[in-house]
Amino acid sequence: GDSVTQMEGPVTLSEEAFLTINCTYTATGYPSLFWYVQYPGEGLQLLLKATKADDKGSNKGFEATYRKETTSFHLEKGSVQVSDSAVYFCALRRDSGGSNYKLTFGKGTLLTVNP
Amino acid sequence: NAGVTQTPKFQVLKTGQSMTLQCAQDMNHEYMSWYRQDPGMGLRLIHYSVGAGITDQGEVPNGYNVSRSTTEDFPLRLLSAAPSQTSVYFCASSRPQGQTEAFFGQGTRLTVV
């Protein structure tokens, strides 16, 4: 079945540090890939997405590139801020075969950014 | 815009009690889903619906019932609460076509004692 593996946290960085959160996936076909963010006490919000190989999703300074050859979708940000402290979830959705109602999530990575 | 609204935000139940978690969306989305979030487990799909009158089981359906009588509402029922159902519950909605995103509610934090 489908699965998503993302790096274990927690991750603690200083402000303005470079961030990478690794995400790899297993799925048949050509899934869409997502990064969701969960700020403390809130629900999940879509951070960025990519729907086909070599697409780059970007938002709020975060980027991730859909790499089919390595089945990866790593999240990066060049300079993190305290306000980026949150839990980040990598997820996939198969958009064919009647499965496009379902997101498959990684376990989440807690990021803490210190001033 | 309200988006996806879940009630209540917090709930404490005693073992064996029943309750209903409410979820409503105002975006006319066909797809709605319930997930539970547990530490170190990510989000796991409980039940989902692809339209009014149609529901099906996800990965972890045991102990939960759902129904979908309208497009807007998708309540989740706990029939006889158990401590293993202590979790944070999220409702999500989306459109079926294209590569559209899922919208999530704020979550319900449930504790079963």
Image (spheres, coloured by chain):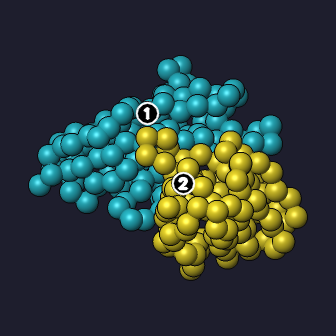
Point out residue A110 in the picture as x, y percentages from the top left corner: 33, 46
Residue neighbourhood size for the residue with mark 1, other residues' Cα within 10 Å, grouped as few (<14), some (14–19), many (≥20): many
**Image coords of residue B93 (percent x, y):** 66, 62
Please indicate whether residue A99 sits to the left or right of residue B60 in the image: right
- In the figure, is residue B109 to the left or right of B54? left
Q: Which residue is mark 2?
A: B83
Q: Name which quarter of the figure residue B101 lies in.
A: bottom right
Which residue is labeled 1 in the image? A6
Residue A101 in view in this figure: no
Residue B17's place in the image compared with B36, above or below, is below
The residue at 58%/61% (across/down) is B15
The amino acid sitting under disc 2 is Pro
- The foreground one among A30 and A22 is A22
**Chain ID of residue with mark 1:** A
Residue A106 on image: x %, y %: 50, 38
**Chain identifier matching the cyan colour in the rendered picture:** A
Q: Residue B95: image x %, image y %?
A: 72, 59
Comparing labels 2 and 1, the label whose residue is closer to the camera: 2
Q: Residue furthest top?
A: A69
In the drawing, does residue B112 fall left or right of residue B31?
left
Q: Residue at x 35, y 61 (%)?
A: A40
Amino acid tagged 1: Gln
Chain drawn in yellow: B
